[in-house]
Amino acid sequence: MKRRKFLKNSSLSTAGLISAPVLASCQEATSSATTTYENVKPIVIATWNVPNATNKAWEVLEKGGTALDAVEEGVKMEEADTNNQSVGKGGRPDRDGNVTLDACIMDSKGNCGAVVYLQNVTHAVSVARKVMEDTPHVMLAGIGAEQFAYEQGFPKENLLTEKSRLEWEEWKKESKYQPVINIENHDTIGMVAIDSEGNISGACTTSGMAYKMAGRVGDSPIIGSGLFVDNEVGGAAATGQGEEVVKTVGSFLVVELMRQGRSPQEACEEAVARIVKSNPNHKSFQVGYIAINKNGETGGYCIHSGFSYRVYSEEGHRNIESESFL
Ligand code: ASP
């Protein structure tokens, strides 16, 4: 809440027109809104140990590039890497054998773009950026997103590699033909960066849950769930079982908790705790969050151990094993 509005509400309070809890929450919001961030320096954080992606993003930031370019260029490295079977080309298909991609991007002005159920185009994040910059919309889905990508000059490619196809054939033999919920199988890349101007942007891209039902979309392309950025506060991104992230609007929650004064680490822990609390079966799935605030402080937390995240700043690059609830 802006200070002027708060002061106005204070006088309403004196007249007995607003309640004490409302006033308390206004005071909380006012104090966080006046937080000053000092010595903002470029930094990037990403889900999982993705050195190629963070190196690329850092290369952009180091040259004075924007956070928006940094996150796009960074996550594109994973989209193009066929060894990463959870993002872009080489991603594991849905249960019908189709590789379908979800991605979103958000800039420091609050603009965003997303694509869901995109097929045959490797760089879903760049298509999402085009949606943000060249259309009046936020999200394009399926055939419409694919058609738009071709109009924008993206090449048509077969995203199903031989390796992913053979693994899918194997899965079909064994499975009950249901989507896989596997703790180790989540490798969405979510990335948030701050540039030398102190502006924050983020991106998130995935091929989603392996062998999912055709048409299934997770959290990754949904602004507020897989990714959220507020240039006054910070940014957050999620990985893991998207359904649970969507139900709690996870990344938005992390950013709002930071706005209320929590550190990035505390905010990630609280967002995971909300999921755990409402899910007696939380042992059967993974969710992980990363976060960064305007000061460049970072944090990460997950349900199961095994999740890591990567930070690159002037102090160098680090891979951090996330703390976990279990
Ligand atoms: N969050 C992604 C989804 O639910 C999956 C992942 O992180 O691998 O689609």
Image: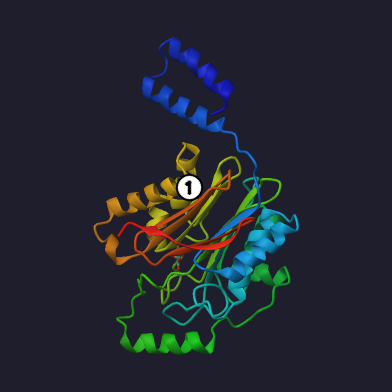
Q: Quadrant of ligand 1?
A: bottom left
Q: Which residue is mark 1?
A: 264
- The percent coordinates of residue 249 (x first, y second) are 43, 50
Quick one: which residue is furthest to the top in this view?
Answer: 15
Q: Nearer the viewer, residue 215 or 64?
A: 64
Name the spot of residue 113 as percent of width and height, x first. 61, 56
**Residue 214 in view here:** yes
Q: Residue at x 58, y 48 (%)?
A: 296
| Colouring used for the render | rainbow
Instruction: Please name whichever residue, 181 or 297, is drawn nearer the observer in this view of the structure.
Output: 297
For this view, does 219 lie left or right of residue 305?
A: right
In the rendered structure, the answer to whether residue 59 lies left or right of residue 165 reads: right
Furthest residue toward left: 280
Q: Is residue 267 above or below residue 103?
A: above
| Image coords of residue 175 (percent x, y) | 32, 83
The residue at the point 55 percent across, 32 percent down is: 33
Relative height, residue 210 to residue 18 (above, below)? below
Residue 306, position as x, y percentages in the image: 39, 67
